[in-house]
Amino acid sequence: MGKIALAIHGGAGTIAPELMTPTREKAYREALDLSLRKGYGVLLEGGAALDAVEAAVRVLEDSPLFNAGRGSVFNADGQHEMDASLMNGSDLQAGAVAGVQNVKNPISLARKVMENSGHVLISGNGAFEFAHKHKVPLEDDQYFFDEFRYQQWQETVGTDVYQLDHAASAPAKEKKFGTVGAVALDTNGHLAAATSTGGMTNKKWQRIGDSPVIGAGTYANDASCAISCTGHGESFLRAVAAFDVHALMLYKGLSLAEAVREVVHVKLPPLDGDGGLIAIDREGNIVLDFNCSGMYRGQVGADGIYHTAIFR
Ligand code: ASP
């Protein structure tokens, strides 16, 4: 069996350790652990990297702790508009959805877009129609409701302020990005990446971030690496962050760690690009890096042990 490995994230940002109660931390770690187990289980059975990242992300979408699927932030109209994308490193196939509502697992809709639509990225009502046609499970608005996100929205509702997914209790102290993602290497040496998010609290004008944009929030190519980003979407879009890691490896010959460092610590900061990313290469090397105080993250590689972490 070839090497297999998986990494996941549940968002990065300014996560203040003093605001993290033991109960809350335990809940986060359990959700991350379950996601790792689901995704790695697929790889252990010889499954494809694409199936593994989809399975891992679905677990995080189903948890209200993260800003993706259930528990997504509220937009200016008090609704949930979700973005997701995934990419397969072996054939560069990709699928994505933007601004979708009521779809239980946007990442699985992105997969259907990749496999059945003839397109890469579809959005809004059209994406909803496509979901309906392909019998993708839907949920009512109540399913996506989370009191914590609702309180976040109440701080900005009726204003022009939109904000990244920060804690209601201490806005100035804690600013975090609850987007989720996964990257994997399967036993056949193939890579894949997936990212899913509710975007920014109080967003309007059908704002779309980096998460559903191939090359910005998500990228996978067997020639180099698989990447899933989390952070200030506008900056990651301008930096074409995920593709840039790939390009630095392929064209400049940098290692995975060097390429990630360059993007996260050199290229993004001047663009106000707070956040981080998870990355994996064909050898199964994993890099989880961020330029803020924390990132919900986990990995399982050569040692077969499930590692989760939040702070640096
Ligand atoms: N990148 C996401 C966005 O801008 C936010 C996040 O990572 O939480 O939509």
Image (cartoon, rainbow, N blue to C red):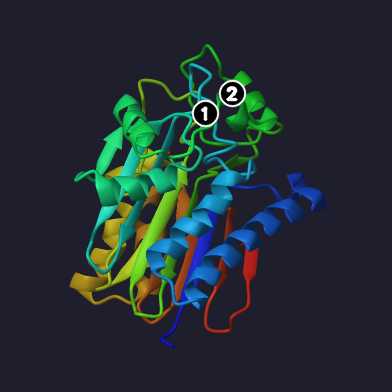
Q: Nearer the viewer, residue 167 or 73?
A: 73
- Looking at this rendering, what residue extends furthest in the top direction? 158
Q: Quadrant of ligand 1?
A: top left
Quadrant the N terminus occupies? bottom left
> x, y (%) of residue 64?
63, 40
Q: Are marks 1 and 2 in contact (CB under 8 Å)?
A: yes
Q: In the figure, is residue 109 to the left or right of 246?
A: right
Q: Residues within 10 Å of mark 1 (few under 14, many from 20)?
A: many
Q: Is residue 42 visible?
A: yes
In the drawing, what numbered circle is on residue 201?
1
Q: Residue at x 56, y 19 (%)?
A: 156
Residue that label 2 marks: 153
Name the amino acid type tagged 1: Thr
Residue type indicated by callout 2:
Trp
301 in relation to 38, above or below: below
Q: Earlier in the sequence, mark 1 or mark 2?
A: 2
Who's the residue at 36% across and 30% down the image?
Answer: 128
Q: Is any part of residue 215 visible from this angle? A: no
Residue 279 relative to residue 244: left or right: right
Numbered label tally: 2
